[in-house]
Every structure is written in C-alpha cells, then in structure tokens.
Image (cartoon, rainbow, N blue to C red):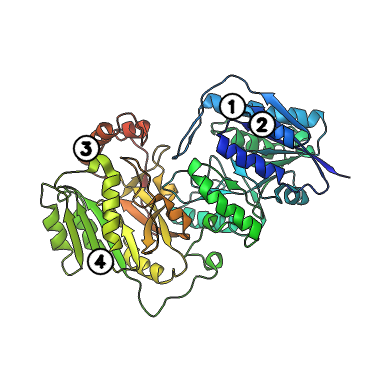
Amino acid sequence: MNQRVLLASPVKQQVKILSEFLNSLLGLEKTNIALDFIFIDDHNDHDLLTRFALEAFNVRILPGNSNASYLCDESTHYWREDLIWKVAGYKDHFIKIALEEKYDYLFIVDSDLYLNPKTLTHLISLKKDIVSEVFWTKWKPELIPLPQVWMEDQYTLYESRREQLTEVEISKRTQTFLHMLSQPGTYKVGGLGACTLISQQALERGVSFSEIYNLGLTGEDRHFCVRAVALGLELYADTHCPPFHIYRGSELEKLQEFKEQLSLSKSQVPAEQLILSPYNRSLTGSIQRANSRRSTLTLAMLVCNESTRHLERVLKQAATYIDYAVILDDASIDDTVELCQKTLKGIPLKLQSNKEPQFHNEIILRKQLWEMALKTPSDWIMILDADEMLEDDGPQELSELLNQSSNIDYLSFRLFDLWTETHYRDDPLWQAHKWYRPFILRNISSFQAKWQETPQHCGRFPKNIADLRGGTSLLRVKHLGWIRPQDRLEKYYRYKRLDPNGNYGSLEQYLSILDPNPNLVKWETR
C-alpha cells in the first residue's frame, strides 16, 4: 500500500528561488508514495504556485494572513516575533489538515531548498517519527557553513547536560558534532527544522509549532522540538540526501554545480558543504602528512595610527611564525610605519602607505591589501587586524597545522572579544567566539576573487572562498581591541559615524559597546 504524504510549505519567496524549489519537488522520487502538496501563498507578487498546480497533481493553495513585510538580503534573514508566530500558525494549520485527512506523513519544507530527488523515499524508509534532512548554511557571509540542526537550547552545537564546560571542551564537543554530521548517517539530535518529515503517530501525539508561553527560545522550530521531546518523541537528523539551501540570491550560481553533482552521482554531499577539521583525523580522512618542505606564510594587515595600541605586541608574536609580511598603512599620522619596520626587521616586508585615508570605504582597502598579499611567494596568506593575535601556543600549533593541511584551502578559527586581559565578553550580542571564521587562505594563483561590496563589514577575505575546501581548528584568536575603555569609546563613535543606521552592522551591538556591566567570562588556556 502506498504511503500517503502531504508535502507542505508556507511560501513568501523570490521568483528565481521559488522556481528552483518547485522544480525540485517535481523531481522527487515517489515509489510507493501518494504525494499531495499544500502551500500557503503569503501574499507573493507572482503566480508561480498557480502554475505549479497545473503541472503537478493534488495541489492545494491557501491564502496567507495579514501581509507583513519580510526582509532578507545577501547578509542574512531578519525574523521579527510577529512573523515567527504567523509562520507557526501556518505550520499548525498543516498539522490540522494532515490529522483530519489521515495522512501517514506530513513533510514540512522551507521554500528556499532544492531537494535531492531521493529525499522523501529515503526519509520514509528510516521509520522515524520526526526526522530532518541536514543541510549546511553560512548564516552570515563571513562565517563557515553550519547545519540547521543542533543539540540543545537555541543553537548549541554540543551536548552539555548542564555541565560546567571549559572553552576547550566546548570546542572539542562542537567539532565532534560537526564531524558526525559530515558523515552519512542518521543521528539523534536536540533540534531541527526546515526539511522535516513527521509521522502520523507524532501528529496524533500532539506536536505543534505554537508558542510555549514560559519558554524564552526564539523561533517556532525550537518550540516544536521542545514540545515533541516532552511528549516522549525523539528527534533525528539524516545526512544521506542533503538539499541545497538557497539562502541568498547569490547562491543560485552554486546551485547549478549542486545539480551537476546530483546528475553525475559523484557524491552524496556537495564538497563546498563539508566541514573539515584538521584536528580530527577521522574527519579529514585523506589529509596528508607534512611534506618535506615546510609551508610558508604571509601575514597581511591593515594599519592606521596603531603605534600606541596593540600593534607592537601583535607583530612581535607574528614575527615568530611568519615568512613574509604585507602591511597597508591607511595614511597614519603617528609612527605606525616606523614601528612596523622596526618590529618586523629581518622579515621580508612590503609596506605601502596611502596618502589619503580610505577606512570610510573599507572594501577599497581590503581589495588593495589582497592584491599586495597575492604577490608574495608564500603558500598561505593570513589576514589579521592590528589588534588580533593568536593564543600563546598558537605560533607553534599553526606551523604544524599548515604542514598537515595539504588538501584544504582555508582555515577557520574562533575569535574572542577580550574585554580585559583575562576575560572575554559573552552575551547575546557578543557571540563571535561561538563561530568559526576564515583567517588563513591558501595562495592560489588561479582563484578569481569576488567580494562583498559594502563600505563597512565587507569581510577580510573574498566572499567566494566558501567555494574552496575549508577546515576548522581548535586554535583561537584573541581580539585585543576592546580591552581599553578609551578604545571602546573611540570604536563606538567610529561605528556611529560610519554606519549611523546600522546598514552594515547592528545598531544594538554598537550601543552595547558602552554597557557598564557586560557579562564577562574568564579566558582559559587549553
């Protein structure tokens, strides 16, 4: 007997992205499946859903509620509370219909996914009450791809069970979780969403996306997951048939590569979505041991009036592990240039000074620095700001890491915003240390750079390095720029001057710089 499945999706989507989503639905394998579709048209200004209904069988299109604006751009998606609970209501309406019409499964899918044709048949074959197919997304352009499933709370990528964990243990457990999800398998998790198959048994048990009034977590999927576990259900994530997440319009170009991979059946997981960890041999698999020749490294850095801040300290450490240095001075009026020359004496140095400052348009400086760095004969390029340095054991660790990373192209570390010499900031607006971001890139002559063309917060590397093979490391980076109160005040006024409306950053975070009592956590050595 065929399994009756209702595939459901609330839709408020761009034409190009929705077209790809709908095309992938038409390509789903349906062996032993009676598949029906239901969409909520949330005030779209196109007729793609109506046209889809002419091509597919058993399609229902329901009207959405109030027409509230939903903003997404090339950086991220912006969810307001009213939008979250409107979508929750849509999903609960799908649950109600699936129960009333006695479907065997409800498959709720976000409309910005391109599904693997085998997705539905495979998920049903697992015989799980609640299971999501895993995909990987760069939630912000400067970050590495991460999964849409998690272990605990809002988006904790490790299991803690209320233990008091050190940063080292947190990092290790996070790496273990990401490693697990990079391998084909089906795994028990604590949170999931966006591509979720729900059995009739789970529906009858009372699952719902509605708000749990005494739960502070953001997002309807969190409330769904907490309620499901409280009802005695288990949550699973599967990694055999990952969809492609079209999170930004710019991802459409990569989608074509994903389609080619599917058609050629070369790999079940797109290479650009794998997270490799040079510290986990079972994950990297084919990472080779060191070559006979030691890898060489160029340090590239922007500076401007840094001589009385942290520059000397940063460069003294860098001088112990770099082979070349490229410094772009943005029209300093102090002795920054002389300090660079003195501290890096004995290291091949290319130092260039701009006559007029360009920091109001950071993208110009980043491109200029990048072109300078490419001309050095090193294997790798590391870009640090003038107030960033490796942790104490970092130099030796980094040298070993580069020699062992022969089949990855960039390395990502976590950045800790130190508020004192011994403590870093940790609160909802200061979470940099929980994310991995690229700091080192292989010097690839054929690489064609594409940049985030914004005057502020444009990223230190070209945005398309995500197309290359990436790896993460437990090695950490210290951000010293917040340690001194006078520097915090200066940065506050600089951000307010250069980005007064928060177009490129967060106004709320800018204001929080002056918080007199921020939450601080002690820095622990590994």
Residue at 76% over, 35% down: 203
Q: Can you tell which mark lies on residue 54?
A: none
Q: Which quadrant is the N terminus positioned in? A: top right
- Toward the right, the furthest residue is 1
Mark 4 against mark 3, which lies toward the viewer?
A: 4
Visible in this render: residue 152? yes
C-alpha distance separating marks 4 and 3: 31 Å
| Secondary element at tag 4 | strand
Q: Which residue is mark 1?
A: 44
- Toward the bottom, the furthest residue is 292
Three-letter code for the amino acid on which mark 1 is drawn: Asn
User: Counting residues from the N terminus, which is met first, the one under dot 3 or under dot 1?
Assistant: 1
Seen in the picture, residue 79 relative to 139 is either above or below; the reply is above
Q: Can you tell which mark lies on residue 324?
A: 4
C-alpha distance separating marks 1 and 2: 9 Å
Q: Which residue is mark 2?
A: 49
Answer whether labels 1 and 4 touch (C-beta < 8 Å).
no
Give the x, y percent position of residue 92: 69, 28
Q: Which residue is mark 3?
A: 490
Answer whether labels 4 and 2 touch (C-beta < 8 Å).
no
